[in-house]
Each structure stands twice: as C-alpha cells, then as structure tokens.
Image (cartoon, helix red, strand yellow):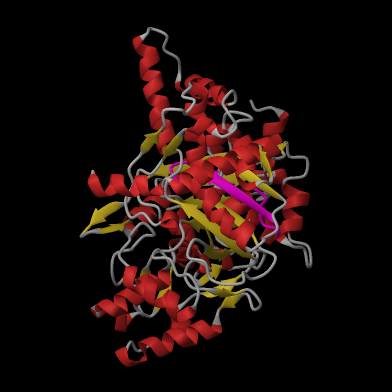
Amino acid sequence: MIDDQAASVRAAIAEGRTALGIEFGSTRIKAVLTGAGNVPVATGGHDWENQFVDRIWTYSLDAVWAGLREAFASLAADVRAKYDVELQTVGALGVSAMMHGYLAFDASGELLVPFRTWRNTITGPASEQLTALFGYSIPQRWSIAHLYQAVLNGEEHVGRIAHLNTLAGYVHSRLTGRRVLGVGDASGMFPIDTATGTWNATMLGQFDDAVAERGVGWKLGDILPTVLAAGEPAGTLTAEGAALLDPSGTLGAGVVFCPPEGDAGTGMVATNSVAPRTGNVSAGTSIFAMVVLESELSRMHPELDLVTTPAGDLVAMVHCNNGASELNAWVGLFAEFADRLGAGADTSTVFESLFTASLDGDRDAGGLLAYNYLSGEHITGLEEGRPLFVRTPDSRFTLANFMRAHLFAALATLRIGMNVLLKEEAVGLDTLFAHGGLFKTRGVAQRYLAAAVDAQVSVGDIAGEGGAWGIAVLAAFTRDRAEGQSLADYLNRAVFAGAGLETVDPDPLDVAGFDAYVQRFSTGLPIERAAVAHT
C-alpha cells in the first residue's frame, strides 16, 4: 500500500511526466529521476574506477556501457520498490559526464586509441603551443590539446580520425544517433565564440593551418560535434539506444534528449549559477570557483580557464588542485588524540568542534601560516607540493588560530586566482553559492569564503542530487521551455523558487584579516618551494 504522495508520483512515472538525468562521475555513475517541480523521486548508481594502462588514465568503453546499464537498472529497481510500477518511459532524458579528454573514432565508429581522460598530464607541449597560437589559455586536459599532442607525436591513428567527442557526447550519440554536444561541454574541447554559440572560426582556421603540412587528412571543424545550447532538442532515444540503456526491453524508445553536458555545466545548474555576476565554489579534494562573466576579459590569464554555461555565457574558472585534504588530515589527527584520551567522538562531531573553535581565533589567524599543498599548484607555480605548518616565536599559537590558519589555507590559493578576476579584471560578482564538505559546519567556512572574495556567499540544500540532478533539470528545460525563455529564468521560476538559503555578507574585519593572511601566504611561498626542493 502506498500513500497519496507516492500514488501521485507513481502516476507521473507511469504517464512519463518525469525527467531522467545520468552523469558519469570519476568514481560513480549516477541516475536521478525527477517528478513535479524537478524534485528527485528515485535514484540509482554504479561505482567505477579509472585504470592506469600503459601510463594513460582511462576507462574502457565496455565499462562505460556496463556501468550505464547497472545505474539504470538500480534506478528502475528503486522505482519498483518505492512506487510499485515499471519504468517504461520518461518525459525527457539527458546525459552528462566528466569534461575534456580524448575520444577519437574512425569512420565506422571504432575507438582508435583508449579513452584519454581529463586526468592525464601528457599534453604539455601541445598546451603551450596552442595557447601561444590562439592567445587563449588551452589547459592540458582539453580535447584539442590531446589531439594536437597526438599530431606532434606523429601517432599513426591521427590520419584515420573521422570524429572526436567527449564521454557525454559519445554516450549521447549511441543513444540517439546524433553527434551533438552541449555548449558547456564543448567549451572544454575547443574555444567557443560566445557571439555565435559555436566553435571559434578564427581559431579553427589557425589550427588547420598549423597542421596543414602534417597531412592529417581532415579539417578540425569536420570532426568536432555540432554545438547546441540548453533548451534545444538534441534527438530522441532510438530503439537501439533503448536496448543499450535497458537490455530488459522495458524502456521504450522516443524519449526527447537535451544536449549532453559536462560536469561543470551541470554543477552550475544544480547551484543556480548560470546568470552573469553569479558563481559557485565547490570545495572538496580540490577547490574551484566558476564566475559567469558579463563580457570578455581584457587579456589572457594563465590562472584562468574560460568555459561557458550550458546556455553559452562565458565563465571564468579558477581551479586549484589542493582543497580540504590537508585540513581533513589534521582533523583526523585530533580525532585520534581524542580516542587515546578515551573521549572519542564521531567524525562529524570532531569537524564541527574544531571548525567552530576557529571562530574564536584572531582575524588573521594570529600570525600562523599553513600550506595545504599535497600536490603541485599551477596558480602559484609549483609542480609538486609539501604540506607545511609554519609559525614564528611571537605567533599566537592557539587551537583556534591553528584551525583558522588551515581553513584559510584551503581558500588562499583560490583567493590568489580570484584576485585576477575581481581586482585585475574588475569582474562584477553579486553572489557565490558554496557547496562541498568544507561548508557542512554552518557559518564557518562560508564566513571565511565571504571574507576571501569580499562578496556575499550563500549555502543551502539546493544542489539536489548533484550533477545527475542538474542534467535532469536541463532535460526538463528542453521539454518544458516556453518560447524565448532563458535557462536562468527557468531555474528561478521552476526549480529554485522558494529554495532555502543561508546568506552571509563579508565582515570588514574578516576581510582585513584574510587579506593579511594571504599576504603572509604569498610572501612565504619560497618556504614551500624550498621544502619541495629539499625533501
């Protein structure tokens, strides 16, 4: 027996008044089914891991399809268990995945070399040469860097390339028969001209000229997918695609698809950060900020990636390799000490206690200094990292200051990158949405981030089920979009209206304290470099 609310959801599922989002994350493939108001009603998933094969980080295509089927099957089982109905159709569908990387296919659709993911750092020469050629930052993980590196390497498969794609675009093409890509995901393959909403024609020509004498046998524009913006129909589920997704034969064909997107784009949707002068910060193992721009930047900055929202608006990304891992390690040490005293507590309690203690510290962390660099950090010019804690004899060495120093360290490199946007480029920023484990203790890291960027910061449970939910929302937008309606308007009206947020404004004293800490952090970078050189 199911209650009235469940009965309503059951009817929506049976009648196809739903949207399904599937996202291929780095460690989990997740499926989310949404109903009325874009509220999640069922979920499914499948854990997977990349492999390091012949010094390349990769996923096999067999793992892609096996994982997709498992994720869908677990979603269908969740629907069956909750609502006593079979998942025979959905109202709209979307696929998203990790951005960037390299999937090259021949004319028969066969993969020419194993999938080279975003994680590989094997395209240094190509990245440098293309950045110089275009006058536009081309990070190593971008698809075009992988392609050009293959050209520079003289790899045999290059002459047989018929088309390139991202993981999301590849899965979408097999499910719908259409080789298209959402503009946000596309912007991590090759630069986008935001005026036309598609590949930058000038740079396409520059690339073709650069490889002309190498006899590649193709023009770049011919092997890239067609670019679509959010809300544009991107095909329908074919019978062959339905069989790939659901071998049981229960799911029917004909479902409308939104353009496939990257995980950065679905993150922007899931945090309602797609309008100019908005942004989001995600803090976990790494930390990054994405700010939607009102206009082009005045010049290229190596600290910044330029991508787009799913609607095609320009976004500047500040990506830092090091986030909260070193902070977590120290919290683990304190938890171990508590256990030794017989006063053990669960991890969340230890985090909350230590984070809250930081609020009693001096505004500048009492002269203490921490570096959270477990790995290299391009923003500060370090190829390797060494976690460090440094104090002077006159520093105020208290638990509160110690924790504040480490929380500041998790945000310091982000602030250095954000200075390029907020100070050098004078980019307008009205509000940031913050999400990730760093912000789970209320009113602590949120307050420090507001001080770090001197802007309003909001947190709240609006990110739903993450990127899989974000792509489900994009699928619903494609189905429901009113004539001329923007993605930002749809999110504000149909998704986030009435969403509960906690917002803090920057405290001027906190801003001054963080400024002093970042100055100390920047001045002390030679200490970090010496540690890398001598340990």
Residue 322 in which image quadrant: top left
Q: Is residue 346 magenta?
A: no
Residue 294 in which image quadrant: bottom right
| Residue depicted at 57% across the width and 31% down the height | 440
Magenta residues, as a range?
271-287
| Residue depicted at 69% across the width and 34% down the height | 7
User: Residue 306: horizontal and vertical position, in percent?
Assistant: 54, 65
Please, is residue 149 above or below residue 330 in the view? below
Where is the C terminus found, in terms of image quarters?
A: top left
| Residue depicted at 57% across the width and 59% down the height | 420
Q: Is residue 280 magenta?
A: yes
Along the line of sight, the residue nearer the viewer: 188 or 45: 188
Please, is residue 158 above or below residue 173 in the view? below
Say whether residue 474 is visible: yes
Left-right relation of 374 to 501: left
Left-right relation of 385 to 93: left
| Residue depicted at 57% across the width and 51% down the height | 267
